[in-house]
Amino acid sequence: INIFKEKSKFHHIGLSVKSIKSMHPNSKTIIDPLQKVRIAFINLNGVRLELLEPLNKSSPIYNNLKNNNKLCHICFEVDNINKAIKNALKKGFYIVQKPVSAIAFNNRKVSFIFHRDYHLVELIQR
């Protein structure tokens, strides 16, 4: 995807789930208190899925599930997250969450942006 005018590579699809353990009992989970989610990564036929379970009712994932939205986001890895965001803004995206360190990605920076055609997109610093 060349929206970001930045070398980007598909990384994963984020899915909202009520319970990681009930879906994938042997999954190793990570708790991210900043994002208010429990996370597990699984591989489904060569596609990496990020399962996101809300920690509490204040989690954004809680509202996804309440509204029956399972597809949360698509994630792309980029060389320069700030440049990618700047270029995405020129293409009609807006920032949902500025870059923050993500526990699930060894504290690499992640950001969430939104576009009415592409919906929620996560960017992760390579």
Image: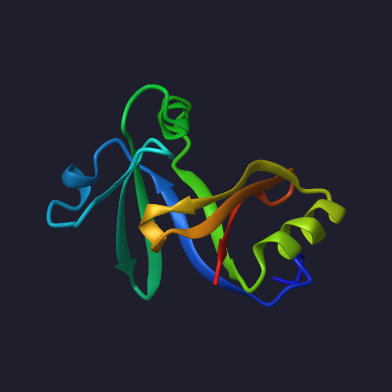
Q: How many marks?
A: 0
Q: In this view, does 83 lie to the left or right of 66?
A: right
Where is residue 34, by image quadrant?
Answer: top left
In the rendering, at what x and y percent does residue 80 appear?
67, 69
Please tell me whether residue 65 is drawn above or below residue 74 in the rendered image. above
Nearest the viewer among 83 and 68 is: 83
Where is residue 76, by image quadrant?
Answer: bottom right
Please tell me whether residue 31 is drawn above or below residue 80 in the rendered image. above
**Residue 51 in view:** yes
| Quadrant position of the N terminus in the picture | bottom right
Q: Is residue 54 left or right of residue 71?
A: left
In the rendering, at what x and y percent does residue 6 appear?
73, 73
Residue shown at the point (23%, 52%) measured from the top left: 29
In the rendering, at what x and y percent does residue 92 appear?
83, 49
Please tell me whether residue 1 is drawn above or below residue 85 in the rendered image. below
Residue shown at the point (19%, 53%) measured from the top left: 24
Residue shown at the point (17%, 43%) measured from the top left: 22
Nearest the viewer among 106 and 113 is: 106
Nearest the viewer among 17 and 83 is: 83
| Quadrant position of the C terminus in the picture | bottom right
Residue shown at the point (75%, 64%) measured from the top left: 83
**Residue 120 in view:** no
